[in-house]
Image (cartoon, rainbow, N blue to C red):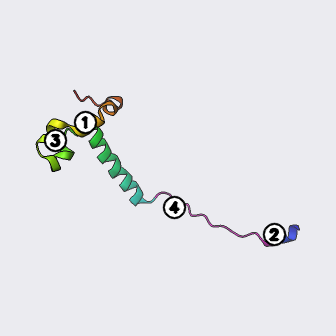
């Protein structure tokens, strides 16, 4: 039984290269865009579509209002 078990063992190679640089760059971009949207957007995102009206409506600001205060961003 032991001899049969030993003949069935195979070597497994595991690559330990870590996280790719592309994944780190993509995550940094997502973080930066999210930080801008939550922390600093005052209608800039939707102004591309709605024009000046977006600065009055502040859709993203209202959606992320409580999250702003929890993160320490003053908004009014």
Which numbered disc, 2 or 3, marks the residue that appears first in the sequence?
Answer: 2
Which numbered disc, 3 or 4, marks the residue that appears first in the sequence?
Answer: 4
Relative side of 54 to 64, left or right = left
Cα separation, mark 1 vs mark 4, equals 41 Å
Write down the residue under mark 1: 61
Cα separation, mark 3 vs mark 4, equals 46 Å
Q: Pointer 4: residues within 10 angstroms few (<14), some, or many (20+)?
A: few
Which numbered disc, 3 or 1, marks the residue that appears first in the sequence?
Answer: 3
Write down the residue under mark 4: 17
Residue 40 is at least partly visible in this image: no
| Element carrying mark 4 | loop
* In magenta segment, residue 14: yes
- Which residues are drawn in magenta? 5-19
* In magenta segment, residue 72: no
Residue 6, numbered label: 2
Cα separation, mark 3 vs mark 1, equals 10 Å
Closer to viewer: mark 4 or mark 2: 2
């Amino acid at each position: 039984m032991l001899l049969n078990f030993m003949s069935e063992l195979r070597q497994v190679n595991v690559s330990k290269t870590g996280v790719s640089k592309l994944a780190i760059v993509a995550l940094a971009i997502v973080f930066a865009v999210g930080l801008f949207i939550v922390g600093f957007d005052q209608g800039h995102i939707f102004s591309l579509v709605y024009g000046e009206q977006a600065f009055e409506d502040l859709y993203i600001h209202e959606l992320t209002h409580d999250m702003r205060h929890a993160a320490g961003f003053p908004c009014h």
